Image (spheres, helix red, strand yellow):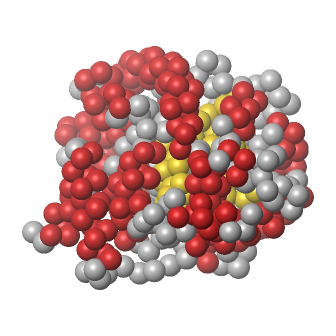
Amino acid sequence: MSTIARLEREINGSSRTLRLKAAQELGELSRAGKVERPVSQEVNNHVHTTYSFSPYEPAAAAWAAYKAGLGIVGSVDHDSIGAAEEMMEAGALIGIATTVGFEVRVSFLDTPLAKRKINNPDSEGIAYICIHGVPAQHIDEVKAFLAPITAVRNERNRAQVRALMGLIGQYGFDLDFDRDVLPLSRYADGGSVTERHILYAMARQTIEKYGKGDVLVTFLTRNLAIPLSSKIEALLLDAENPHYVYDLLGVYKGSFLDRFFIQPSREECIDVREAVAFANRIGAIAAYAYLGDVAQSPTGDKKAEQFEDSFLEELLDLVADIGFKAVTYMPPRNTKEQMARLQALVQERGLMEISGVDINSSRQSMNCPELLEEEAHHLIDAAWALVAHEKLGGHREGWGLFSRDNPFAGRSLSDRIALYAQVGRAMDPSDPPSIIGIFEELV
């Protein structure tokens, strides 16, 4: 095994110490010109890690993004910010800029959109939002903020596993939350447990029982009555498919989850105003996560369905009124027509645009070439501005992009984003504090 192959294995291993040591050695090898990588303007602010659900430990996510040629990688986990410190440390060791945040479901039940499916395929009146650019000194506050949410969620997770066993126990499955699901997570280290963990455990048991190929496909289509597209069927018939368990998980999430899903409570999905107020108080950037009507899911885990597009103006008016600072969206998931309309409406309301592609499967690429197209290229500047916001706000609260005490508060948002993007790009990613001196020269 080559040195690089060994280090790439260690950077995604179980020991945080070894992961960071591998990150340091890989960074040194890269700076010595011994690692080949493309160099792109692409960025990704929304990479999930093992702290929610992903094949990547935080350091491994930073390395995968760097190796793919990205300039920025951001960790965003469901109901957890546990990946943040490792992501930042590994990014500096490797030489890639980082940003950290979290994703959380919030209640719109006390708003005019209570009866709408907003951006959540599973629930009406419940929406996903992202809290981006969390300054380092507030990470512990975020952990405390999220702890009761994850505790309540786990009680629902246990109930969901029991409901699932009521459906599949007759086929010889034996799933237990504490024995089979919880160990797949990083809950003991501040991570969360999601429905994907449950479905991953189910997918693993399915493969153990039926193997890969014809027998498994027959079980899905006949016993569970799950329809399969020709594309997905071909993937599941291929026993050599390296992403097999993730593809099967995607089938279960898209076509089986709703059979045992239990709606979350208000304790688990706090009021949207409370979540946004918390983000604003700690100097983070609360971003509504636009999904848009789905014709065909690129990751195979969402049905064709209508979401915000028919009431988008009403939604964005509410988002701005609540105090969100940004809207985040994923260019690969949306049509150019959806993006053009969204961008115009967001800009009218003075909101920042943030991009990111939620990486949570081994099949997905870290790259997002759509960002290089004319209609999305400005999102790269926004990503560098996000990095600068986080690092500068971590040094001095008043230097956050949206702070009232920002020395450039009198300028337009677009001017501030351009300025912060310039500062972010000038930072040495191996020495993030270098950004302070760069900014001080402009103040």
Q: Is residue 214 left or right of residue 166?
A: left
At 36% across and 65% down in the image, what residue appears?
94
Instruction: Please tell me whether residue 32 is drawn above or below residue 138 in the rendered image.
Output: below
Residue nearest the viewer, comparing 231 with 405: 405
Q: Is residue 146 shown above or below 298?
A: above
272 to the left or right of 180: right
Tell me where residue 50 sits by quadrant.
top left
- Residue 90 is situated, as x and y percent measured from the top left of the image, at 37, 56
Task: Give the number of callouts.
Answer: 0
Q: Is residue 384 visible?
A: no
Q: Quadrant of residue 368?
A: bottom right
Q: Quadrant of residue 209?
A: top left
Q: Is the C terminus in the top left, top right, bottom left or bottom right quadrant? A: bottom right
The picture places residue 183, in percent across and down from the top left corner, at 28, 31
Q: Is residue 180 above or below residue 103?
A: above
Q: Is any atom of residue 183 visible in this view?
A: yes
Compare residues 393 and 40 and report the one nearer the observer: 393
Q: Which residue occupies 49% across, 39% down?
A: 81
Q: Percent x, y for residue 376? A: 69, 71
Q: Is residue 19 left or right of residue 423?
A: left
Q: Position of residue 49 (x, y in %)?
A: 41, 47
Question: Which residue is more in the foreground, 137 or 35?
Answer: 137
In the displayed orientation, state which residue is furthest to the left: 1
Q: Quadrant of the N terminus?
A: bottom left
Name the residue: 41% across, 81% down.
38
